[in-house]
Amino acid sequence: MELISGAGLVVKLVLLILVGFSLLSWAIIFLKFRVIYSAIGDSNRFQQFFWNKRRLDAIGQKLRDFPHAPTAALFRDGYQELIRHQRENGGDEPGLFNMETGQTENIARALRRATNQEIQRLERYLPFLATTGSTAPFIGLFGTVWGIMDSFQGIGKTGSASLAVVAPGISEALVATAIGLVAAIPAVVAYNHFISKVNVLSGEMDSFSQEFLNIVGRMLRRS
Amino acid sequence: MTIPPPPPRNEPNLFWLLAISLALHVAVFLVFSGVFFNGRHIERRPVYYVDLSKMPVLNPQAGRPDGGPAPKAKKTAKPKAAVPAPKPAAPPAKTKKPKTVPAAPKPTKPKPTPSKTATKAAKPKPQPAQSPASTGQNYQSVQEKLAAMREKQQRQQELAALKNKIAALSGDAGTDSGSHGSGAPLGMPDGKGDEIGVDQQTWLRAFYKENWSLSKYQVTRLDLEATVSITYNSEGHLINYRFVKSSGDSTFDDSLKRAILKDRILPFKPGRTLQLDVVFNLKDLMD
């Protein structure tokens, strides 16, 4: 407490910025924790449900049970595209499709678009964690350098370079680096963790897209 | 064949999470700033100041460790009361007229402003000296005046003596509150022996306090307390020390080690193996 109150104006300003970074990055950590883990949970449940069902329309009716699953969002977009083509080509009976082989491209594009949207949603605010992780130590370092400059000026004025004169100023200046690291370390750890989870989900979405296209292709060949 | 609309995704509000984050930061700040610990009531033991230049004794007498010679304030107070006392008795008894008469106008002699009125007032001095015996009335009035003056002087002296006594008493009260040299006999409050001085443990505690140092910038909490068992042989050599109860703060523990090891040989010989458990309290040490 004394270290902070005894610091200079610039160091205090740096500390304030760092505390702001830390506050926001922790809020984002909580948010992303909730969003990504609910997405992983729902996605796992949806995939189990998907592979246990044989009919696409039956799966489509139960999508509300998996609100956070990105694969469920992919299925919705892909299936909607499929239905749209079926309607355009005059198909009435549910589960039966009348499409030419080249038209699966439309479904693939819809799936890609949905994948991008989901990845964007999952990665939202994560760049702020990366920014905090990379800049907070430098901001802290700036505060420290400034504080040490002030401290050396004080030494010059007093004309004494004893430890008792030098140490307090340096100690107060180093608080800025310490707070910078305190803000940066959780942000970097959380960023790496969440990015790895998003990559896993992204891989799952790619796999699901391929599987969905395969199923649609098989259905078309059968029809 | 239709698909139900996508369900709303109940993602948490960022502002709420920001508030939670703020609360978390405040809590962490409070924990690290020691607010929860500083408020805790710590029982304060009476603090005695020990004169380290006087070596400790085995069987101290009853008294106070900060006792010893009378303080300077007392020395100055007593002579004041003693000096004015003899003055009144001596001059008035022996001298009769001529010496006392000029004594009365003395206070009316203001040196810096020698005004005319003052010189006029001084003029009548020789008049009573011219014929003291001739006029009986004059003599009588002078005697009365003299008696009144003596009485007044005596009252003033008594008042001064009383004032000095009060000052001396209040000086004692001030020193009793915990400062050095109360005037009480040098010893220990629970002393039962007959030697003048403090006991070895009290002396050593003051000795360690003297040797102890820690920068205020290294102090993170004030409620640190450690118990160290220290052993000296009969020659006063440090044989062993160990932490019976660590403070949990390595910086504080290191500072205690330094204080203990600073003087491995005591300046006195205990005459027996001296084993003591010393409780080091950071607040006491910083006082």
Image: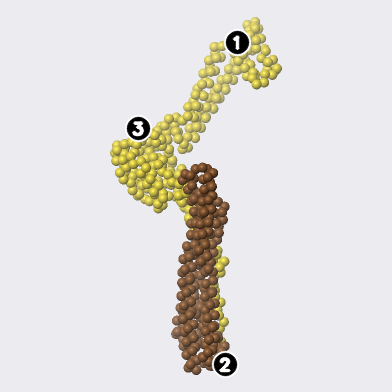
Chain colours: A brown, B yellow
Measured as percent of width and height from the top left, residue A174 is found at 49, 53
Q: Which amino acid, by three-letter code, is at mark 3?
A: Glu
Query: Residue sitting at 45 percent across and 46 percent down?
Result: B215
Image-based side of A66 in relation to B117, left or right? left
Q: Which amino acid, by three-letter code, is at mark 1?
A: Pro
Name the outermost residue toward the right: B116
Query: Residue sitting at 64 percent across and 6 percent down?
Result: B131
Q: For the residue carrying disc 2, how many other residues have a C-alpha within 10 Å: few (<14), some (14-19), or many (20+)?
A: few
Which mark lies nearer to you, 1 or 2?
Answer: 2
**Secondary structure of the residue carrying numbered label 3:** loop
Q: Which amino acid, by three-letter code, is at mark 2?
A: Asn
Residue bearing the label numbered 1: B98
Residue bearing the label numbered 2: A89
Q: Is residue A158 above or below residue B143?
A: below
Q: Which residue is at the front of the view, A144 or A23?
A: A144
Residue bearing the label numbered 3: B195
Name the outermost residue toward the top: B134
1 and 2 marks in contact (CB < 8 Å)? no
* Whole-number angstrom distance, CA of label 1 to CA of label 2: 150 Å
In the picture, the disc for residue B22 is none
Measured as percent of width and height from the top left, residue B5 is found at 57, 82
Which quadrant would residue B261 be assigned to in this image? Answer: top left
Chain ID at mark 1: B
Q: Same chain for the residues at labels 1 and 2, yes or no?
A: no
Query: Residue sitting at 34 percent across and 36 percent down?
Result: B267
Q: Is residue B153 above or below residue A195?
A: above
Measured as percent of width and height from the top left, residue B103 is found at 60, 15
Q: Same chain for the residues at labels 3 and 1, yes or no?
A: yes
Q: Is residue B193 above or below residue A111?
A: above
* Whole-number angstrom distance, CA of label 3 to CA of label 1: 60 Å
Chain ID at mark 3: B
Specify whether residue A46 is in view: no
